[in-house]
Amino acid sequence: MTDASFVLTTDFLFDGLTHRWQADMAVEVAEGEIVEVRKSTPKDRPERHVARLCPGFIDLQINGAGDVMFNAGPFPETLETMAKAARKGGTAYIMPTYITAGDTQYQQAIRAVETAVGTGMSGILGIHLEGPFLNPEKSGIHPRDHVRTITPHDVDVLTRFSHGPIVVTLAPETVDDISLRNLIGAGVVVFAGHSDADHPTAIRAFDTGVRGATHLFNAMSQMGSRSPGLVGATLAHGVAFAGIIADGFHVDPACVAVAAQSMPERLFLVTDAMQTLAGKTTSFNLYGKDIALDDGRLTDKNGTLAGAHLAMDQAVRNVIKMTGIPDTMALAMASTIPARAIGMDDQLGVIAPGYRAGLTILDNELHPAGTVVDGVLFS
């Protein structure tokens, strides 16, 4: 649907403002924005009626989908394929994620996103660079020989990005204070990840403006009785956000529950999806490592996890099952909270007049039935 204006009526609406469903609602969209949210009336056309409606899902960490990987093909057409495949899981907007690569190869990924955003490609918010400024001792599946420290040239490149938000995952213990402050001061959304930071270092990073932690619990210093680490700092800080991979493999359900209870307004879902998502691929090569999909799990030959085979709607249903939280809270973790985490909560994550028309359409079992991306309906 590409109408300049239309109305969607719904049995139940979650608007992202309160953790409750509103019955028999109508959302009017015009020129890519939400112009009215109200009780539905008999005048509203029934062919645009849906079971459930919520703010559009936002995936801040997605490496590939639809048989393509951003690292393998850092081009606009790759991003278009990824966004289309992600929509099958109800995701309206993605932050395509480019992981550690040699030298300044990430600059090609930046140019691809600049082109995509500049030409109005549906669903591309900006870019997430996961590395290469990581701790090599926590590199995980990232190629260790490409992990390196940040340079003034890197800072200059990253702070000049102006085509939407840019998220940079780095290990704060490996980055000098001046570089970190320059990144944050220029509006780069910095997350701590692949890090062995001790608790004081992590707290200092959050107090400096590091926004949160990437894939909480994975590839980071853990919480011990006398060494809270990055995990403990994130849970207790009170302001820091965190993404979490709720696929049942990356994080034990009990840990997911602890995080959800500890930071209910700061924890958000990510897929960390690879090219197998919504594709036909069951194996691929990642920087010389053979990665295989087996019973929903992506690993190399040593059993190291290599991203996830996970759609956002499945993550929502998983986190409800793992934690027992209300379904509206899980939906907020896929929409409202990630928008807040990257500073876009004045545009997305809420269904209210003046917001961009980003919506996810669901059935009563929380399976996706379509998305609206800036006023365009995909079903």
Image (tube, rainbow, N blue to C red):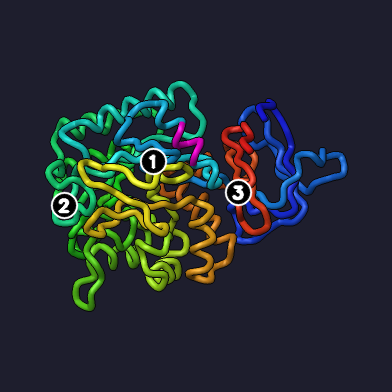
As shown in the figure, which amino acid type bears the numbered disc 1? Answer: Gly
Left/right of residue 201 with respect to residue 261 in the rendered view: left
* Label 2 or label 1, whichever comes before in sequence order: 1
Label 1 element class: strand
As shown in the figure, which amino acid type bears the numbered disc 3? Answer: Pro
The residues colored magenta run 81-85
Q: Quadrant of the C terminus?
A: top right
Q: Residue furthest right?
A: 42
Asked whether residue 241 is in view, the answer is no
Label 2 element class: loop
Query: In whole angstroms, how far apart are the C-alphas of marks 3 and 2?
Result: 38 Å
Mark 2 Cα within 10 Å, few/some/many (few <14, many 20+)?
many
Label 3 element class: strand
Q: Which residue is label 3 attached to?
A: 368
As shown in the figure, which amino acid type bears the numbered disc 2? Answer: Asn
Asked whether residue 147 is in view, the answer is yes
Q: Which residue is label 2 attached to?
A: 135
Q: Are marks 3 and 2 in contact (CB under 8 Å)?
A: no
Residue at (63% x, 51% y) in the render = 15
